[in-house]
Amino acid sequence: MSTRINVTVNGLQYSHMVEPRLLLVNYLRDVLRLTGTHVGCDTSSCGACTIHVNGKATKCCTLLAVQADGCEITTIEGLSHNGELHPLQEGFNECHGLQCGFCTPGMIMMAADLLQHNPQPTEESIRHALEGNFCRCTGYQNIVKSVQYAAEKMKMSEAVH
Amino acid sequence: MIPVAFDYEKVKTVEEAIAALSGDDLKILAGGHSLIPAMKLRLSRPGKLIDIGGITALKDIKEEDGEIVIGAGATHADIMYHNLIRTHLPFFTEGAATIGDMQVRNWGTIGGSLAHADPAADWPAMVLAADATIEMQGVKGRRNIKATEFFTGLFATVLEPNELITAVRIAIPPDGTKSTYQKFAQPASRFALAACAVMRFPDGRTNIAFTGVGDHAFRDTGAEQAISGKAIDDASVEAAMLAALQNVDVMSDHYASEPYRRHLSKVYLKKALMAVKS
Ligand SMILES: Cc1cc2nc3c(=O)[nH]c(=O)nc-3n(C[C@H](O)[C@H](O)[C@H](O)COP(=O)(O)OP(=O)(O)OC[C@H]3O[C@@H](n4cnc5c(N)ncnc54)[C@H](O)[C@@H]3O)c2cc1C
């Protein structure tokens, strides 16, 4: 039995018939070919598959595509605008927030959720927010710095506008 | 990992859910953050899922007749960010923030957590300490049951197979009530290796509940009797620690042996009592 879903992904509307058991991460990667969202542990522990569903950070290996019917989805591909990197993407680049890069899309999407709720997070709240995102290379120091960089940059551009 | 194929129905109202639940081999899907992992591992193979995630009426958090009413579909994050909860049940705010991680808190629901009844889940201890009432609805109608009578064993509750939790109700505690949730989290999963929820009323009455300790969360009446009505000091805390976990079958697993978990639980009881000391 297939079910129709209508979703908006990175501003574009899609409509597909899907099997109820199709995971949202597989819908994004295999149907929409948005492979920036990674499958790490496939057990909702590692956070590599973090995206936003209706603005909320979500591990989409633990969500059925049918659950996202009618939702607005943002993936890492939807974060930059007109070729300009999001401050978090820039931060991870500037502060060496990655080594192998596998966890990075999830880290950035989780950090983006944090900055929406808390634009000036303390180091402790950054670490608490990233609790569900594992990195096996960096030791997290530079990831925290990257998020601080982005928070600072976003504050500056607020001040300018 | 891919679950076994199943049928799927999304419902919009509680009535639709009850009607849909009259079949066999089906399961309610709320946030899916316990059920989907189990289905991916094929530990659970329901023939059909009834998705209640779209029932907006179940997401409400409100004050009604001197009670805080939390809809079963409220997520851990909804509860954590809610001002009414922060004002009247600050230990729910504190405790919700310790559940899994932010992504899990964005999807997991209080109703799902209570129905699932994981022996190490957080809400069971908090609703027990808050002396909550669980509101349920099924084909046979509505019923309310005290949280103290809801949990019956390992992943087991009084819920009938085709019954829905609709809300959790908690009498608004009087001014001056103090509450806390103290949890020692398993470092990878964040589930409780031992956790203690305490609500202490101005008259000294003290509710104490544990999770992560036995095969289901429970109120510790021995510890409650030892501390209720007494000032919280070294001697009374010591007495409560001694009285705690009598006749409790403490779990043992590869994370924590029985003696270690018993000790840890008492240490967390002490932390909790110190946190509500005036
Ligand atoms: C990585 C990870 C870490 C986690 N860490 C923690 C933690 O630290 N502490 C903790 O407490 N939990 C933790 N959880 C579990 C999480 O809180 C779950 O979301 C929650 O236990 C279940 O809620 P749900 O809405 O996702 O339920 P679902 O997974 O949708 O359902 C769970 C069960 O409850 C039934 N059900 C759901 N809603 C209802 C209802 N209204 N009425 C009747 N039956 C219902 C379903 O049929 C199913 O059997 C974690 C989960 C993950 C994936």
Image (spheres, rainbow, N blue to C red):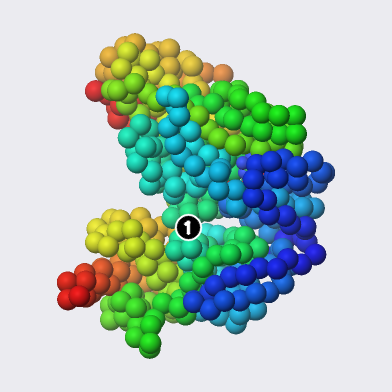
Which residue is the site of mark 1? B103
Residue B182 x/y as whole percent: 38, 36
Q: Is residue B252 found left or right of A145 in the rendered image? A: right
Nearer to me, A20 or A60: A20
Residue B32 visible in the displayed image: yes
Q: Is residue B65 found left or right of B7 in the rendered image? A: left
- Please state the chain letter of the residue tagged with numbered disc 1 in the rendered image: B
Residue B217 x/y as whole percent: 55, 30
Residue B54 x/y as whole percent: 60, 52
Q: Compared to B212, does B200 lie above or below?
A: above
Q: Is residue B99 found left or right of B177 in the rendered image? A: right
Residue name at image x 77 percent, y 57 percent? B7
Residue at the outermost bottom position: A83
Nearer to me, B39 or B58: B58
Label 1 residue near ligand 1, CB within 8 Å: yes
Residue name at image x 38 percent, y 15 percent? B205
Nearer to me, A137 or B219: B219
Q: Compared to B264, does A113 lie above or below?
A: below
Q: Compared to A158, does B218 lie above or below?
A: above
Three-letter code, disc 1: Gln
Name the image quarter holding residue A67: bottom right
Name the image quarter holding residue A155: bottom left
Nearer to me, A87 or A132: A87
Query: From the image, which quarter does the C terminus of chain B lie in?
Result: top left
Q: Compared to B89, does A66 lie above or below?
A: below
Q: Secondary structure at mark 1?
A: helix
- Packing grade of label 1 (10 A; few <14, some 14-19, many >=20) is many
Residue B263 visible in the displayed image: no
